[in-house]
Amino acid sequence: MVRKLLIDELPEVFVSTAATSTAIAAAVRRGRVRKLGVRLYTTNMVEPLEGVVRRHLWQIVGLLLPDAVVSHRTALEGKPTAGGSLFLTGGYERTIELPGIRIRVLKGPGPVEGDNRFVQTLWLASPARAYLECLRIRRVRGSESPALSRDEIETRLERMVRHGGEAEANALRNRAREIAPALDAERPFVELDELIGALLRTRSAPLSTPAARARATGEPYDSARTELFGALHAALLQWQPTPRPDPVTSGTAFENLAFIDAYFSNFIEGTEFEVEEAAEIVFENRIPRARPEDAHDVLGTYRLVSHPEMSRSAVAEGVGFDDFLMTMRRRHWTIMSGRPEKRPGELKQEVNRAGLTVFVAPGLVRGTLRQGFEMLRSFAEPFKRAAFVMFLVAEVHPFDDGNGRVARAMMNAELVAGLQRRIIIPTVYREDYLLALRALSRQVISEPLVKMLDHAQAFCDAIDFTDLSAAIDALRRSNAFERDTDARLRIPS
């Protein structure tokens, strides 16, 4: 009865004691339990041992090392290293080998002010303590070191300042100052103090990572967004654009195509008119009494995309970042001039979002745009410039409103300046466009966006815009105006 009670009622992972060791050893021989480590067992007889350990990781650590402090890099990362190492601080050094996991206990103080209770009997080091512990280790050797590298620490601190601001950075520094004597970490505190001071621009200290250096020089940027830009840049380097020449930069056909460009660009943003009604707004200046602001959005977009301004590349040779920024702001002003409350031409001062997506913070807009511009200027082909600049502006969202329209105008200006066909996004293709943007923005997948833009350009290239009525008929036959998500865009032969 005792033996049955032990086995049938034991948890999936447990440690043996002096009172149960004989019964547990017998259960191992009978194939009722399996050994995970010294005094550590599982009743799970099916799952690989590595999986059992991973699922019950912190419970196991708490069973084996009561009152130890989860410390060093593990306290910051909250998980094992890529090689399966966990780091804790305890009364003496030891290493515990488990299936797929190595637990290293480093000798050091127990919990100090700011550390918190963790799973079962464990403690979790405060971020201030964890940074000090990492900085105490002078030589970081490989990915299984207890300490994060100096670059990794810089990156984490820069991210903290970016999201939490000066207050959070100062709170971390003050906590570290308080606990440094108890940890014998006065020297690491001096280094941490210098790092935070450099990031807050209150003192000078050497920094090695690009994001940290940019912040210290007063132009911080959103490093998560620059990773997306890098992914798109790499994809475009491999892409072979199909030349679709269009030497027409003025006249009736140019104006008709500009109208369709403006019409669809506004429709994407929810400014929905029937195409005939939009034509009356643009060509006859008939402003609907019920919707004057929406009408001015269409008019403002048309004024830009039909203007000789579209023949100027924002990244032509000799154009610097400040020129690029001024061009974008000027184009935004033209589009949004009918809505003075939207601050046309002025960079945003408050965070903006679309659904679950939060765009680049106002203080990071200029720096993030500069990082993207440096990648953008490496392209010579108009299509590559067009695709990149559209995503750059859309992802940063530098203005209060009108970001999608100015992004697509910047895109098409690169094509017109390069004597290539524009890209229009018909209503029926709206979801494809948005899904491709999200694939890159949320999953870092670039190919759908590049292929979608190529397809949209091929479609536009197949339409003759010499006569507007004939062009609209061709667009209708191609399902361009369809709102039904089951409809498909047809490219005319």
Image (cartoon, rainbow, N blue to C red):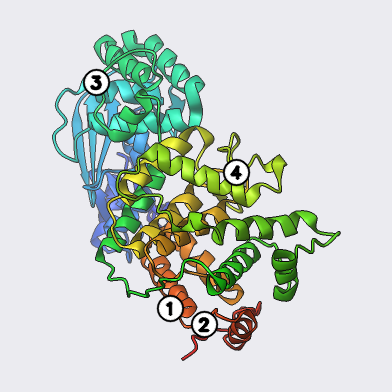
Q: Residues within 10 Å of mark 3 (few under 14, many from 20)?
A: few
For residue 46, above or below residue 175? below
Q: Nearer the viewer, mark 2 or mark 3?
A: 2
Per the model, the C-alpha gap separating discs 3 and 4 is 34 Å
Q: Residues within 10 Å of mark 1 (few under 14, many from 20)?
A: many
Q: Which residue is mark 3?
A: 206
Per the model, the C-alpha gap separating discs 4 and 2 is 38 Å
Tell me which numbered mark, 4 or 2, is placed earlier along the sequence.
Answer: 4
Tell me which numbered mark, 3 or 4, is placed earlier along the sequence.
Answer: 3
Tell me which numbered mark, 1 or 2, is placed earlier along the sequence.
Answer: 1
Tell me which numbered mark, 2 or 3, is placed earlier along the sequence.
Answer: 3
Tell me which numbered mark, 4 or 1, is placed earlier along the sequence.
Answer: 4
Tell me which numbered mark, 3 or 1, is placed earlier along the sequence.
Answer: 3
> From where the camera sits, is residue 59 visible?
no
Q: Which residue occupies 40% across, 60% down?
A: 417
Q: Nearer the viewer, residue 316 or 217?
A: 316
Q: Is residue 287 left or right of residue 329?
A: right
- Farthest residue to the bottom: give it: 493
Per the model, the C-alpha gap separating discs 4 and 1 is 33 Å
The kind of residue tagged 1 is Ala
- Residue 464's label in the rendered image is 2
- Farthest residue to the right: give it: 289
Q: Which residue is mark 4?
A: 352
Q: Nearer the viewer, mark 4 or mark 2?
A: 2
Q: Which residue occupies 37% across, 55% down?
A: 3
Instruction: Determine the image quadrant of residue 79.
Output: top left
Which SS class for mark 2?
Answer: loop
Q: Nearer the viewer, residue 220 or 3?
A: 220
